[in-house]
Image (cartoon, rainbow, N blue to C red):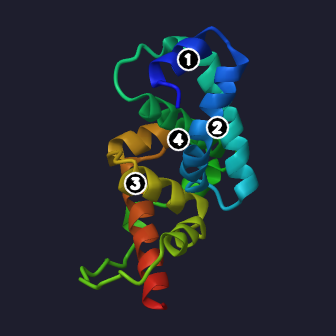
Amino acid sequence: MTSERKLVRECKRKNPRFQKLLFEQYAPKMLGVCMRYFHDKNEAQDALMEGFVKVFSNIDKFRMQGSFEGWIRRIMVNTSLNMHRKNLKHYYHVDIDEAQHRIEDSRQSFDHLQVEDMMKMIQSLPAGYRLVFNLFEIEGYSHKEIANQLEISENTSKSQLRKARLKLQSAINKI
């Protein structure tokens, strides 16, 4: 396996062999990242390809400080968000005051759930819920950061997260 430093250095030199190696090494994991943001695998693959175009065109900006995989992951998340922002802005017009249900703190064991089952449940969420859920619960963004990224209010972010949790909790309880 090629060292990460050599891989980055050769990709900065636009060496096609190393660009292919980089893609082959990171694409499967990054497709998983993109899949969390889309219902459809084709949309996720579009985001993946667009993301890798950005990786290769901006690789000169990576200074070997911090995680290279983390840098690529950030590009994939931002690319996925940009694709949604272009096409699905109208999904985010719900204010937290409109929401009336509360999530119960139920300490249930969900060991029987498979990762694939959870991914399917998350992918089945409406686009706005899914984006906020992924950004908050998986990527670790704050509601303020999510609001800035998606150009929505913090209250809308909170509402979308709460509704996503309710839908997921309902789906899990049906299992």
Residue designated by label 1: 59
The Cα–Cα distance between marks 4 and 1, rounded to whole angstroms, is 16 Å
Q: Amino acid at mark 1?
A: Ile
The percent position of residue 18, horizontal first and vertical second, equals 64, 22
Q: Is residue 20 left or right of residue 1?
A: right
Whether residue 9 appears in this view of the structure is: yes
- When asked about the image quadrant of residue 121, the answer is bottom right
* Disc nearer the start of the sequence (3/4): 4
Residue designated by label 4: 77
- When asked about the image quadrant of residue 172, the answer is bottom left
The Cα–Cα distance between marks 3 and 4, rounded to whole angstroms, is 11 Å
* Element class at badge 2: helix
Q: Amino acid at mark 2?
A: Glu
- Compared with 50, 173 (above or below) is below
Q: Amino acid at mark 3?
A: Ile
Q: Is residue 93 left or right of residue 105?
A: right
Q: Is residue 104 left or right of residue 56?
A: left
The Cα–Cα distance between marks 3 and 2, rounded to whole angstroms, is 24 Å
Specify few, some or many for label 4: CA neighbours under 10 Å numbering under 14, 14-19, or 20 or more: many
Tell me what residue is drawn at x 64 percent, y 33 percent: 23
The Cα–Cα distance between marks 3 and 1, rounded to whole angstroms, is 25 Å
Residue designated by label 3: 138
The percent position of residue 167, horizontal first and vertical second, equals 48, 76
Residue designated by label 2: 24
**Circle nearer the viewer, 3 or 2:** 2
* Disc nearer the start of the sequence (4/1): 1
The percent position of residue 175, horizontal first and vertical second, equals 48, 90
* Element class at badge 3: helix
